[in-house]
């Protein structure tokens, strides 16, 4: 597997995990899960294999989740 393919797979896993964590938070309202959502969105917001529109959206969403967490 090439480095680029591995990074793309990592980005896909981060995005899938972020969506999963958002659904968990919707059910539980757990602040620790909200923290994890924020962190995943931050990572996606600067991941080199994520498209610019998705990175921008993830950065905005991370900032919104940060107000929920902090």
Image (cartoon, rainbow, N blue to C red):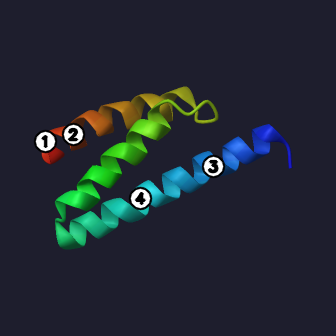
Q: Residue at x 59, y 46 (%)?
A: 11
Residue 19, numbered circle: 4
Residue 10, numbered circle: 3
Q: CA distance from mark 4 to mark 1?
A: 20 Å
SS of the residue at dot 3?
Answer: helix
In the rendered view, does 13 fall on the left or right side of 24? right
Q: Residue at x 36, y 62 (%)?
A: 21
Q: Residue at x 47, y 32 (%)?
A: 55
User: Circle 3: is it few (<14), some (14-19), or many (20+) Cα within 10 Å?
Assistant: some
User: Circle 1: is it few (<14), some (14-19), or many (20+) Cα within 10 Å?
Assistant: few
Looking at the rendering, which quadrant does residue 49 occupy? top right
Q: Position of residue 5 (x, y in %)?
A: 77, 45
4 or 1: tag closer to the N-terminus: 4
Which residue is identified by label 2? 66
Q: CA distance from mark 3 to mark 2?
A: 23 Å
SS of the residue at dot 2?
Answer: helix
Circles 2 and 1: CB distance less than 8 Å? yes
Q: In front: mark 4 or mark 1?
A: 1
Q: Position of residue 4 (x, y in %)?
A: 77, 38
Q: CA distance from mark 1 to mark 3?
A: 27 Å
Which residue is identified by label 1? 70
Q: CA distance from mark 2 to mark 4?
A: 16 Å
In the rendered view, does 30 fall on the left or right side of 42? left
Q: In front: mark 4 or mark 3?
A: 3
Circles 2 and 4: CB distance less than 8 Å? no
The foreground one among 46 and 56 is 46
User: Circle 2: is it few (<14), some (14-19), or many (20+) Cα within 10 Å?
Assistant: some
1 or 3: tag closer to the N-terminus: 3
Q: CA distance from mark 4 to mark 3?
A: 14 Å
């Amino acid at each position: 597997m090439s480095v680029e393919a591995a990074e793309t797979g990592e980005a896909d896993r981060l995005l899938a995990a972020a969506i999963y964590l958002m659904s968990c938070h919707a059910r539980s309202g757990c602040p620790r899960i909200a923290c994890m959502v924020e962190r995943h969105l931050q990572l996606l917001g600067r991941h080199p294999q994520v498209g610019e529109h998705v990175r921008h959206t993830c950065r905005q969403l991370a900032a919104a989740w940060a107000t929920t967490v902090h």
